[in-house]
Amino acid sequence: MRLAEAPSHGQSIVEYDRASRGGIAYLGLAGEIIRRERTRDSNPAKETP
């Protein structure tokens, strides 16, 4: 499991093996968070008093 090996080499999974299943999953999660933040920032909810 490449994901478990990365910390013992002092690297993140993206540095160690971004093409591994864990690396791909991590990058997918990061992308999803960024997309949601951009959507939230461009469509701010109306403030309630």
Image: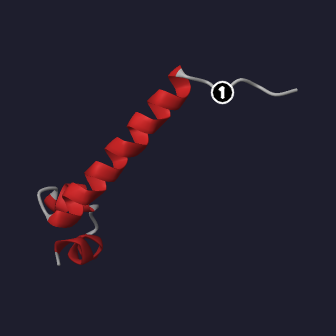
Determine the residue positioned at 14% across, 61% down. Answer: 17
Which one is in front, 30 or 8? 30
Q: Quadrant of residue 49?
A: top right
Is 40 left or right of 34, judged from the image as shown?
A: right
Q: In which quarter of the image is the N terminus?
A: bottom left
Which one is in front, 48 or 36? 48
Which one is in front, 8 or 33? 33
Which one is in front, 37 or 45? 45
Q: In this view, does 45 lie above or below 23?
A: above
Residue 33: horizontal and vertical position, in percent?
A: 42, 44
Determine the residue positioned at 25% across, 58% down. Answer: 25
Q: Residue furthest left?
A: 19
Residue ID for mark 1: 45
Q: In this view, does 38 lie above or below 4?
A: above
Residue 30: horizontal and vertical position, in percent?
A: 35, 47
Q: How is the image coloured?
A: secondary structure
The total of numbered circles placed on residues is 1
Is 40 left or right of 30, judged from the image as shown?
A: right
Determine the residue positioned at 36% across, 44% down. Answer: 32
Per the image, label 1 sits on a secondary structure element best described as loop
Is 42 left or right of 21, judged from the image as shown?
A: right
Q: Looking at the picture, which amino acid does disc 1 mark?
A: Ala
Is 1 left or right of 45, judged from the image as shown?
A: left
Residue 47: horizontal and vertical position, in percent?
A: 76, 25
Determine the residue positioned at 33% across, 42% down. Answer: 31
Few, some or many C-alpha atoms within 10 Å of disc 1 (few <14, some 14-19, many ≥20)? few
